[in-house]
Image (cartoon, rainbow, N blue to C red):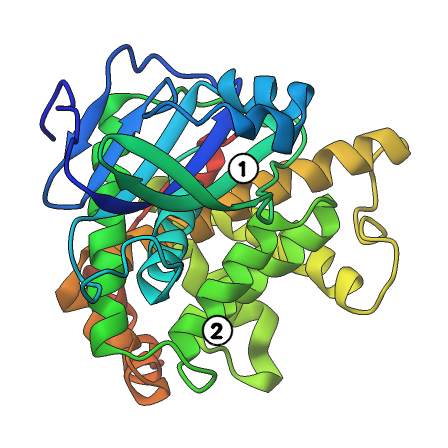
Amino acid sequence: MDRPAQPLTSNRKFAVIAVNNIFTNIAEPLTSSADHTIVSDKLPFVLEDHWRDWLGTIQYDNLSGCNLFIERYRESGWAAGQLEIVDGVNESLKGEVYAVFGLLHLLGNWEYDRANFYLFSGHMKDGFARVRQFTRPDRFQVTREYTKSELTAQSIEDVLALHRAFEDLKDRLPENERARFWRGFRALFYGLKAFHASDRLHGFVRSLEALILPEKSNTEKQFRDRCAIMAAPDTEEATARQMLGEAYKLRSDVEHVNEWDKSLVGLPDASAREQRALWRTRQIEALASAAYRRILLDRNLQGHFMSDVGIRALWGPSNVTNARAAIGNVCDITAVK
Protein backbone atom coordinates (compact mmCIF):
# COMPACT_ATOMS: atom_id res chain seq x y z
CA MET A 1 0.00 0.00 0.00
CA ASP A 2 1.01 3.59 -0.58
CA ARG A 3 0.95 5.83 2.45
CA PRO A 4 0.11 8.39 3.46
CA ALA A 5 -2.86 8.65 1.15
CA GLN A 6 -2.63 11.41 -1.42
CA PRO A 7 -5.71 13.65 -1.66
CA LEU A 8 -7.75 12.89 -4.75
CA THR A 9 -8.69 16.09 -6.53
CA SER A 10 -10.00 14.59 -9.74
CA ASN A 11 -13.67 14.04 -10.45
CA ARG A 12 -14.73 10.57 -9.36
CA LYS A 13 -17.54 8.34 -8.20
CA PHE A 14 -17.22 6.73 -4.80
CA ALA A 15 -18.78 4.43 -2.22
CA VAL A 16 -17.81 4.54 1.45
CA ILE A 17 -18.31 2.24 4.43
CA ALA A 18 -18.20 4.17 7.72
CA VAL A 19 -17.66 2.35 11.03
CA ASN A 20 -17.83 3.84 14.50
CA ASN A 21 -15.63 3.00 17.49
CA ILE A 22 -13.72 0.11 15.92
CA PHE A 23 -10.56 -1.00 17.73
CA THR A 24 -7.79 0.22 15.43
CA ASN A 25 -4.30 1.66 15.48
CA ILE A 26 -4.37 3.07 11.94
CA ALA A 27 -2.87 6.48 12.59
CA GLU A 28 -2.67 7.84 9.05
CA PRO A 29 -4.65 7.36 5.84
CA LEU A 30 -3.75 4.41 3.62
CA THR A 31 -4.28 4.18 -0.10
CA SER A 32 -4.00 1.49 -2.73
CA SER A 33 -4.09 3.02 -6.19
CA ALA A 34 -4.24 -0.44 -7.76
CA ASP A 35 -7.37 -1.27 -5.74
CA HIS A 36 -8.89 2.23 -6.02
CA THR A 37 -9.20 2.19 -2.23
CA ILE A 38 -8.56 4.71 0.51
CA VAL A 39 -8.76 3.81 4.21
CA SER A 40 -8.77 6.51 6.86
CA ASP A 41 -9.82 7.21 10.42
CA LYS A 42 -11.57 10.40 9.28
CA LEU A 43 -14.22 11.25 6.72
CA PRO A 44 -12.26 11.36 3.43
CA PHE A 45 -13.97 14.56 2.26
CA VAL A 46 -16.12 17.40 3.54
CA LEU A 47 -19.86 16.89 3.26
CA GLU A 48 -22.01 19.78 2.17
CA ASP A 49 -23.82 21.63 4.98
CA HIS A 50 -27.28 20.49 3.92
CA TRP A 51 -26.37 16.93 4.96
CA ARG A 52 -26.57 17.96 8.61
CA ASP A 53 -30.21 18.94 8.03
CA TRP A 54 -30.99 15.91 5.87
CA LEU A 55 -29.48 13.36 8.28
CA GLY A 56 -30.33 15.17 11.47
CA THR A 57 -27.78 16.50 13.92
CA ILE A 58 -27.38 13.25 15.89
CA GLN A 59 -26.88 10.98 12.89
CA TYR A 60 -24.63 13.53 11.16
CA ASP A 61 -22.48 13.73 14.30
CA ASN A 62 -22.41 9.91 14.54
CA LEU A 63 -21.22 9.69 10.95
CA SER A 64 -18.62 12.40 11.43
CA GLY A 65 -17.43 10.64 14.59
CA CYS A 66 -16.74 7.30 12.88
CA ASN A 67 -13.12 6.20 13.09
CA LEU A 68 -12.92 3.90 10.06
CA PHE A 69 -13.80 4.91 6.50
CA ILE A 70 -13.19 2.56 3.58
CA GLU A 71 -13.65 4.27 0.21
CA ARG A 72 -13.72 2.61 -3.22
CA TYR A 73 -13.64 4.98 -6.16
CA ARG A 74 -13.54 5.19 -9.95
CA GLU A 75 -12.20 8.05 -12.04
CA SER A 76 -13.69 6.82 -15.32
CA GLY A 77 -16.17 4.33 -16.72
CA TRP A 78 -19.26 6.45 -17.35
CA ALA A 79 -20.52 8.32 -20.39
CA ALA A 80 -19.71 11.98 -20.88
CA GLY A 81 -21.89 14.18 -18.71
CA GLN A 82 -22.98 11.27 -16.50
CA LEU A 83 -20.73 11.88 -13.48
CA GLU A 84 -23.64 13.14 -11.38
CA ILE A 85 -25.99 10.30 -12.37
CA VAL A 86 -26.31 7.32 -10.03
CA ASP A 87 -25.62 4.36 -12.29
CA GLY A 88 -24.06 0.92 -12.49
CA VAL A 89 -20.67 2.30 -11.48
CA ASN A 90 -22.09 3.50 -8.16
CA GLU A 91 -23.80 0.16 -7.62
CA SER A 92 -20.60 -1.74 -8.38
CA LEU A 93 -18.63 0.44 -5.99
CA LYS A 94 -21.16 -0.16 -3.21
CA GLY A 95 -20.90 -3.90 -3.78
CA GLU A 96 -17.11 -3.77 -3.77
CA VAL A 97 -16.72 -1.74 -0.58
CA TYR A 98 -19.28 -3.89 1.25
CA ALA A 99 -17.46 -7.03 0.07
CA VAL A 100 -14.14 -5.64 1.34
CA PHE A 101 -15.65 -4.97 4.74
CA GLY A 102 -17.32 -8.38 4.78
CA LEU A 103 -14.10 -10.18 3.91
CA LEU A 104 -12.44 -8.34 6.78
CA HIS A 105 -14.52 -10.57 9.07
CA LEU A 106 -12.60 -13.60 7.81
CA LEU A 107 -9.51 -12.07 9.40
CA GLY A 108 -10.63 -11.33 12.95
CA ASN A 109 -13.29 -10.39 15.47
CA TRP A 110 -13.92 -6.68 15.13
CA GLU A 111 -15.50 -4.73 17.95
CA TYR A 112 -17.39 -1.65 16.80
CA ASP A 113 -20.64 0.21 17.30
CA ARG A 114 -23.03 -1.79 15.14
CA ALA A 115 -25.79 0.77 15.62
CA ASN A 116 -23.74 3.36 13.73
CA PHE A 117 -22.57 1.58 10.58
CA TYR A 118 -23.15 3.33 7.24
CA LEU A 119 -22.78 2.88 3.49
CA PHE A 120 -23.05 5.88 1.21
CA SER A 121 -22.29 6.63 -2.41
CA GLY A 122 -22.01 9.65 -4.67
CA HIS A 123 -19.49 11.61 -6.68
CA MET A 124 -16.78 14.21 -6.34
CA LYS A 125 -16.88 17.19 -8.68
CA ASP A 126 -14.65 20.25 -8.63
CA GLY A 127 -13.40 19.33 -5.17
CA PHE A 128 -16.87 18.95 -3.58
CA ALA A 129 -18.40 15.65 -2.49
CA ARG A 130 -22.07 15.06 -3.24
CA VAL A 131 -23.70 12.07 -1.59
CA ARG A 132 -26.56 10.57 -3.60
CA GLN A 133 -27.33 7.43 -1.59
CA PHE A 134 -27.12 6.82 2.15
CA THR A 135 -28.04 3.50 3.79
CA ARG A 136 -27.44 1.27 6.78
CA PRO A 137 -26.28 -2.05 5.28
CA ASP A 138 -26.70 -5.51 6.80
CA ARG A 139 -24.46 -5.73 9.84
CA PHE A 140 -21.93 -8.39 10.72
CA GLN A 141 -22.06 -9.80 14.24
CA VAL A 142 -19.68 -11.60 16.60
CA THR A 143 -19.98 -14.75 18.67
CA ARG A 144 -20.25 -13.99 22.36
CA GLU A 145 -17.11 -14.25 24.52
CA TYR A 146 -14.95 -13.50 21.48
CA THR A 147 -11.37 -12.24 21.65
CA LYS A 148 -11.19 -8.72 20.22
CA SER A 149 -8.93 -8.15 17.18
CA GLU A 150 -7.01 -4.98 16.45
CA LEU A 151 -7.35 -3.44 12.98
CA THR A 152 -3.94 -2.55 11.59
CA ALA A 153 -2.41 -1.47 8.30
CA GLN A 154 -1.52 -5.12 7.75
CA SER A 155 -5.20 -6.05 8.18
CA ILE A 156 -6.05 -3.64 5.36
CA GLU A 157 -3.34 -5.04 3.10
CA ASP A 158 -4.53 -8.58 3.82
CA VAL A 159 -8.20 -7.85 3.14
CA LEU A 160 -7.43 -6.08 -0.14
CA ALA A 161 -5.42 -9.11 -1.26
CA LEU A 162 -8.34 -11.31 -0.24
CA HIS A 163 -10.76 -9.12 -2.20
CA ARG A 164 -8.58 -9.28 -5.33
CA ALA A 165 -8.56 -13.07 -5.05
CA PHE A 166 -12.33 -13.08 -4.47
CA GLU A 167 -12.96 -11.06 -7.64
CA ASP A 168 -10.53 -13.20 -9.64
CA LEU A 169 -12.28 -16.41 -8.61
CA LYS A 170 -15.69 -14.94 -9.47
CA ASP A 171 -14.40 -14.31 -12.99
CA ARG A 172 -13.38 -17.96 -13.35
CA LEU A 173 -16.16 -19.60 -11.35
CA PRO A 174 -19.42 -17.67 -11.81
CA GLU A 175 -21.19 -16.96 -8.54
CA ASN A 176 -24.45 -18.83 -9.09
CA GLU A 177 -26.77 -21.28 -7.34
CA ARG A 178 -25.09 -24.34 -8.86
CA ALA A 179 -21.55 -23.61 -7.69
CA ARG A 180 -21.09 -25.52 -4.43
CA PHE A 181 -18.17 -23.33 -3.34
CA TRP A 182 -20.26 -20.16 -3.56
CA ARG A 183 -23.21 -21.78 -1.77
CA GLY A 184 -20.81 -22.57 1.04
CA PHE A 185 -19.40 -19.06 0.93
CA ARG A 186 -22.90 -17.61 1.29
CA ALA A 187 -23.54 -19.96 4.23
CA LEU A 188 -20.38 -18.63 5.86
CA PHE A 189 -21.54 -15.04 5.42
CA TYR A 190 -25.00 -15.97 6.70
CA GLY A 191 -23.26 -17.19 9.86
CA LEU A 192 -21.13 -14.05 10.12
CA LYS A 193 -24.24 -11.84 9.96
CA ALA A 194 -26.42 -13.94 12.28
CA PHE A 195 -27.00 -12.53 15.76
CA HIS A 196 -27.84 -15.74 17.64
CA ALA A 197 -24.93 -18.07 18.25
CA SER A 198 -26.97 -21.13 17.27
CA ASP A 199 -27.69 -19.62 13.84
CA ARG A 200 -24.05 -18.68 13.47
CA LEU A 201 -22.93 -22.23 14.20
CA HIS A 202 -25.46 -23.59 11.70
CA GLY A 203 -24.06 -21.37 8.95
CA PHE A 204 -20.43 -22.17 9.73
CA VAL A 205 -20.98 -25.93 9.72
CA ARG A 206 -22.90 -25.73 6.44
CA SER A 207 -20.06 -23.72 4.89
CA LEU A 208 -17.60 -26.48 5.84
CA GLU A 209 -19.90 -29.19 4.51
CA ALA A 210 -19.76 -27.42 1.15
CA LEU A 211 -15.98 -27.92 1.12
CA ILE A 212 -15.90 -31.57 2.19
CA LEU A 213 -19.04 -32.96 0.44
CA PRO A 214 -19.80 -35.70 3.01
CA GLU A 215 -21.86 -38.73 2.02
CA LYS A 216 -25.44 -38.70 3.28
CA SER A 217 -25.04 -41.98 5.14
CA ASN A 218 -21.77 -41.00 6.78
CA THR A 219 -22.02 -37.25 7.26
CA GLU A 220 -21.03 -36.84 10.91
CA LYS A 221 -17.97 -39.12 10.77
CA GLN A 222 -16.71 -37.60 7.53
CA PHE A 223 -17.29 -34.11 8.91
CA ARG A 224 -15.11 -34.97 11.90
CA ASP A 225 -12.41 -36.76 9.94
CA ARG A 226 -12.13 -34.44 6.96
CA CYS A 227 -12.39 -31.19 8.89
CA ALA A 228 -9.85 -32.45 11.44
CA ILE A 229 -7.22 -32.44 8.69
CA MET A 230 -7.78 -28.69 8.33
CA ALA A 231 -8.50 -27.91 11.97
CA ALA A 232 -5.31 -28.75 13.85
CA PRO A 233 -1.70 -29.93 13.54
CA ASP A 234 -1.19 -33.69 13.54
CA THR A 235 -0.40 -33.75 17.25
CA GLU A 236 -3.80 -32.22 18.11
CA GLU A 237 -5.91 -33.91 15.46
CA ALA A 238 -7.60 -36.35 17.83
CA THR A 239 -8.62 -33.51 20.15
CA ALA A 240 -9.88 -31.49 17.20
CA ARG A 241 -11.92 -34.47 15.98
CA GLN A 242 -13.72 -34.68 19.33
CA MET A 243 -14.45 -30.94 19.28
CA LEU A 244 -15.74 -31.15 15.71
CA GLY A 245 -18.03 -34.01 16.68
CA GLU A 246 -19.57 -31.91 19.43
CA ALA A 247 -20.01 -29.00 17.04
CA TYR A 248 -21.75 -31.21 14.49
CA LYS A 249 -24.20 -32.52 17.08
CA LEU A 250 -24.97 -28.94 18.13
CA ARG A 251 -25.67 -28.06 14.52
CA SER A 252 -27.95 -31.08 14.12
CA ASP A 253 -30.07 -29.93 17.05
CA VAL A 254 -30.27 -26.44 15.54
CA GLU A 255 -31.32 -27.96 12.21
CA HIS A 256 -34.18 -29.81 13.90
CA VAL A 257 -35.19 -26.77 15.98
CA ASN A 258 -34.22 -28.39 19.26
CA GLU A 259 -32.45 -26.61 22.09
CA TRP A 260 -29.04 -26.24 20.57
CA ASP A 261 -27.06 -27.55 23.55
CA LYS A 262 -29.18 -30.62 24.39
CA SER A 263 -26.44 -32.99 23.17
CA LEU A 264 -23.93 -31.63 25.69
CA VAL A 265 -24.50 -34.15 28.45
CA GLY A 266 -22.28 -34.50 31.49
CA LEU A 267 -21.89 -30.78 32.12
CA PRO A 268 -23.05 -29.43 35.49
CA ASP A 269 -25.70 -26.93 34.41
CA ALA A 270 -27.25 -24.85 31.64
CA SER A 271 -24.61 -22.14 31.99
CA ALA A 272 -21.79 -24.64 31.46
CA ARG A 273 -23.57 -26.09 28.42
CA GLU A 274 -24.00 -22.65 26.89
CA GLN A 275 -20.36 -21.75 27.47
CA ARG A 276 -19.28 -25.00 25.78
CA ALA A 277 -21.62 -24.39 22.83
CA LEU A 278 -20.32 -20.83 22.41
CA TRP A 279 -16.75 -22.13 22.48
CA ARG A 280 -17.50 -24.68 19.77
CA THR A 281 -19.13 -21.92 17.71
CA ARG A 282 -16.04 -19.73 17.94
CA GLN A 283 -13.86 -22.67 16.94
CA ILE A 284 -15.96 -23.57 13.90
CA GLU A 285 -16.09 -19.91 12.88
CA ALA A 286 -12.30 -19.76 13.00
CA LEU A 287 -11.99 -22.95 10.97
CA ALA A 288 -14.50 -21.93 8.29
CA SER A 289 -12.94 -18.47 7.95
CA ALA A 290 -9.43 -19.90 7.66
CA ALA A 291 -10.49 -22.55 5.13
CA TYR A 292 -12.16 -20.07 2.81
CA ARG A 293 -9.25 -17.65 3.14
CA ARG A 294 -6.84 -20.40 2.20
CA ILE A 295 -8.83 -21.43 -0.86
CA LEU A 296 -9.36 -17.87 -2.07
CA LEU A 297 -5.64 -17.12 -1.86
CA ASP A 298 -4.40 -20.35 -3.47
CA ARG A 299 -5.23 -20.67 -7.17
CA ASN A 300 -3.88 -24.22 -7.34
CA LEU A 301 -6.05 -25.30 -4.43
CA GLN A 302 -9.12 -23.70 -6.01
CA GLY A 303 -8.97 -26.28 -8.77
CA HIS A 304 -10.23 -28.92 -6.33
CA PHE A 305 -13.33 -26.85 -5.48
CA MET A 306 -14.57 -25.87 -8.93
CA SER A 307 -17.04 -28.78 -9.04
CA ASP A 308 -18.47 -31.64 -6.99
CA VAL A 309 -16.32 -34.01 -9.05
CA GLY A 310 -13.17 -32.20 -7.92
CA ILE A 311 -14.26 -32.15 -4.27
CA ARG A 312 -15.06 -35.88 -4.30
CA ALA A 313 -11.69 -36.61 -5.85
CA LEU A 314 -9.91 -34.54 -3.19
CA TRP A 315 -11.63 -36.26 -0.26
CA GLY A 316 -11.98 -39.77 -1.71
CA PRO A 317 -11.37 -42.69 0.69
CA SER A 318 -7.94 -43.39 -0.78
CA ASN A 319 -6.94 -39.72 -0.95
CA VAL A 320 -6.52 -38.73 2.69
CA THR A 321 -2.79 -38.20 2.18
CA ASN A 322 -3.46 -36.12 -0.92
CA ALA A 323 -6.07 -34.03 0.88
CA ARG A 324 -3.68 -33.42 3.75
CA ALA A 325 -0.99 -32.30 1.31
CA ALA A 326 -3.37 -30.17 -0.77
CA ILE A 327 -5.14 -28.17 1.91
CA GLY A 328 -3.51 -29.24 5.16
CA ASN A 329 -3.81 -27.53 8.51
CA VAL A 330 -5.35 -24.07 8.01
CA CYS A 331 -5.76 -23.23 11.70
CA ASP A 332 -5.65 -24.80 15.16
CA ILE A 333 -9.10 -24.83 16.72
CA THR A 334 -7.69 -26.34 19.92
CA ALA A 335 -5.99 -22.97 20.52
CA VAL A 336 -9.18 -20.94 19.98
CA LYS A 337 -10.66 -19.71 23.27
Looking at numbered disc 1 in the image, what kind of residue is underneath it?
Tyr
Q: Nearer the viewer, residue 94 or 297?
A: 94
Above or below: residue 236 compared with residue 187: above
Disc 2 residue crowd, few under 14, some 14–19, many 20+, Cα 10 Å: some
The C terminus lies in which quarter of the figure? top right
| In the displayed structure image, the side of residue 77 where residue 133 appears, left or right | right
Kind of residue at disc 2: Arg
Residue 106 in view (yes/no) = no
Position in image of residue 228 (x %, y %): 43, 55
Residue appearing at x 48%, y 73% in the figure? 183
Element under disc 1: strand
How far from the left and from the top, in percent, is residue 72?
Answer: 29, 44
Pointer 1 or 2: first along the chain: 1
Instruction: Work out whether residue 248 can be spotted.
Output: yes
Identify residue for label 1.
118
Q: Which mark is residue 224?
A: none
Q: Is residue 172 left or right of residue 223?
A: left
Label 2 sits on residue: 183
Left or right: 305 in relation to 135:
left
**Residue at horizontal 71 percent and vertical 44 percent from the top:** 195
Q: Residues within 10 Å of mark 1 (few under 14, many from 20)?
A: many
Residue 275 point in image, percent of width and height? 74, 32
Residue drawn at point x = 41 percent, y = 72 percent = 182
Q: Residue at x 76, y 67 (%)?
A: 255
